[in-house]
Amino acid sequence: MKNSAQQLWFTGPQQLEIREQQISKPAAGELLVEVICSAISAGTEMLVYRGQLPSEIALDATIENLQQQGYPLQYGYASVGKVIQLGEGVDESWLGRNVFAFQPHASHFVSRVENVISIPADVAPEDAVFLANMETAVNLIHDGKPLLGERVVVLGQGIVGLLLTSLLGQLPLTDLLVADKWPLRREYAEKFGANTFNPVVDQERSAQQTRLNAVQGADLIYELTGVPDALNLAIDFSGYHSRIVVGSWYGTKSAPVYLGGAAHRNRLQMITSQVSSIAPELSGRWDKARRFDVTWEMIRRIKPSRFISQRSTLAQAQVTYQQLDQQPESLIQALFIY
């Protein structure tokens, strides 16, 4: 049975190592998982790669494996694998089962049973690896509460933005307008019925007012670019009492946000959205299990493996992260395969 694992470690800004680490046999209540694939979260992992993580906060306060602060550290939270060994007391039905785990990038890992999620038999591993990001998209829908006939704008079409657009495209909205500067992302968004534009080019051509007029004061604006200054564009799109949902995590980045003028008079609602908790107004009826059930159904409908644009091994990690850092326009979703 496997007694070592290849693990990806971030050792400093733009510095990576692949380490061979011994792994122990699963103890009582634990599983040994052989990883099939893990998804790179380009937004958050670029903060880790570039050294832009805030020093005063853990990577994720709710995930046991992401409590690290400072280098060296492991990262990654979307891993799919097959259970190959059981610890004492674990039901034999787990053996051979495909599972999802919020685990850093590694070829094998040991986990307690309660920390893995059984993948439905009709969901392929390369669709299941999107569970975390699809859950985020579902949570954004819950936090934004889009209504029939509303005008909705999504700023940013990284993988979470695209998944959100794919869900919004199923709703009877009056307008769905999305912005991203990269053509490949806009092409995918258009497949879900969205109208798209390049905010950088349109601003240079003074065409922004045309876009603003098209939505006539958007009801709901999602900010998912990871660029703090984009909040000002979200404010430009807003109308009276519009909802602005901030799904980006900026790390240590910041920018001036202009809340005078119309922004002040319009009584804007600024909502920060984070998937680690349930929205307070839903928590009496919703829990994580119910939200995961909905997320699996959305994965079945959308088939998000369509967004995979690159598959690489851990040995190729340095090249992959450099490409994400320097050529983001060339990738939608990068995957490590094992």
Image (cartoon, rainbow, N blue to C red):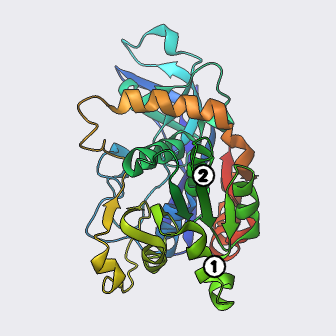
Under mark 1, the amino acid is Thr
At x 69% / y 84%, what residue is drawn?
Answer: 201
321 relative to 129, above or below: below
| 3D distance between C-alphas at marks 2 and 1 | 22 Å
Q: Is residue 278 left or right of residue 22?
A: left
Please tell me how crowded label 1 is: few (under 14), some (14-19), or many (20+) other residues with Cα within 10 Å: few
- Within the image, what quadrant is residue 255 found in? bottom left
- Within the image, what quadrant is residue 320 found in? bottom right
166 relative to 202, above or below: above
| Residue at the disc numbered 2 | 165
At x 59% / y 49%, what residue is drawn?
Answer: 163
| Residue 96 % position (x, y) | 59, 17
Q: Is residue 155 left or right of residue 145?
A: right
> Which of the labelled discs sits on residue 210, or is there none?
1
The one of 220 and 183 positioned closer to us in this rendering: 220
Under mark 2, the amino acid is Thr
